Image (tube, rainbow, N blue to C red):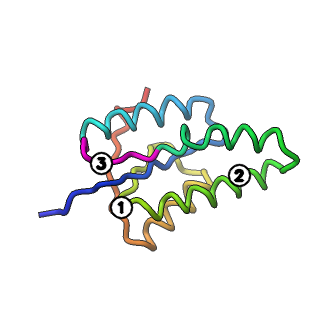
Amino acid sequence: MDEPIYSIYLSGKITGDPNYLKKFWAVAEVLNKKYPNAEIFNPASELLEISKMLSRSDATEEQAHDILVAICLKFMKKCQGIAVIPGWCGSSGTSVEVEEALRRGMKFVPVDKDWLP
C-alpha cells in the first residue's frame, strides 16, 4: 500500500499564461478534495506578492524569474509530492521543478486536464 502524501507542491507554467492563477486555484481546489489531509502548496498564489515586488524593483525579468524559481525550489524541499499542471511544456521554471522532483524521488500526483477552467 502506498504511504499517504502529506504535502503536494503545484507546478505549472506561469510566465506567458494570462490564466495561470485560475488554473493553479482550480487544481488546488480539486487536490484539496482528493487529498483532504495534505497541505497543498500553490506558488502562484503564495508568491504573488513577492512577484509583484520584484516587478517593481530594479531586477530584470530574467533575474526576477530566477529568484522566484529559487524560492520555489526551497518550498519544494518541504513537499513529498508534486502535481504538474497540464500545458507546462516550454516553461523553464516548471522544467527545473520537474527535474528537481525526479532527482529527489518525489511522488508525482496526477492532474487531469479536465480540472482546468
Under circle 2, the secondary element is helix
Picture disc at residue 65? 2
Front tag of 1 and 2? 1
- Horizontal side of 106 relative to 71 (left or right) equals left
Q: Amino acid at mark 3?
A: Ala
Q: Which residues are magenta?
A: 35-41
The residues bearing labels 1 and 2 have C-alpha atoms spaced at a distance of: 24 Å
Question: Residue drawn 51% across and 46% down?
Answer: 12
Q: Is residue 73 above or below residue 28?
A: below
Label whose residue precedes the other's in the sequence (3 or 1): 3
Q: Which residue in the structure is indicated by mark 3? A: 38
Crowding around mark 1 (Cα neighbors within 10 Å: few <14, some 14 to 19, many 20+) is many
Question: Residue drawn 78% across and 55% down?
Answer: 63
Q: Quadrant of the C terminus?
A: top left
Tell me where residue 96 appears, x and y as whole percent: 57, 62
Q: Which residue in the structure is indicated by mark 1? A: 80
Tell me where residue 57 appears, x and y as whole percent: 84, 44
